[in-house]
Amino acid sequence: MTPAFSADEAAAMKETAAERREAVKREKAANKAALDLQDVLDKIAEMPEWEARIATRIHEIVLESAPGLLPKTWYGMPAYANAEGKVVCFFKPASKFGSRYCTFGFEEAAQLDEDSMWLSSWAILRLTVADERLIAETVARAVS
């Protein structure tokens, strides 16, 4: 009995199936990224107006300075992770823990190691242009 498909046809069908599986995997990842981004935006929207202004600007700065970082929530706070899913930096609103200032910080995945001591977070009450520039430079360095 002759096989229904030649070896070339069978190989082509296997390739097609693999391509479809990969397309589904990419679509799921894109959907997760969109949901994660929306979660971050929702968390920012829940903040008091003064914190939301700071968080929104930091969100913009992080995405401009390190477009490879992926927004996600981390312990209910806006955070930004590398391709491996490890949090590089995060924004902690003052209202979350009853603090008098917000915090923008870095986790161990950030590439900020210098000598025996280095920056791991800033306390923030407001942002100046110089502050924004320093955050942008530090975030870019954290992913380099």
Image (tube, helix red, strand yellow):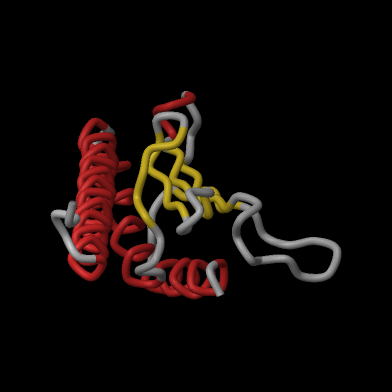
Please, is residue 75 above or below residue 138 in the view? above
Residue that sits furthest to the right in the current view: 116
At 43% from the left edge and 74% from the top edge, which residue is drawn? 133
Residue 69 placement (x, y as % from top left): 40, 60
Please, is residue 74 above or below residue 31 in the view? above
The one nearer the camera, 137 or 21, is 21
Quadrant position of residue 51: top left
Q: Quadrant of the C terminus?
A: bottom right
Residue 59 placement (x, y as % from top left): 32, 56
At 35% from the left edge and 69% from the top edge, which residue is drawn? 67
Task: Say whether residue 108 is left or right of residue 74.
Answer: right
Residue that sits furthest to the front in the current view: 1
Residue 114 placement (x, y as % from top left): 76, 70
Task: Say whether residue 142 is left or right of residue 80.
Answer: right
Residue that sits furthest to the left in the current view: 4
At 46% from the left edge and 30% from the top edge, which residue is drawn? 75
Please, is residue 5 above or below residue 78 in the view? below
Task: Say whether residue 12 is left or right of residue 128.
Answer: left
Residue 76 placement (x, y as % from top left): 40, 30
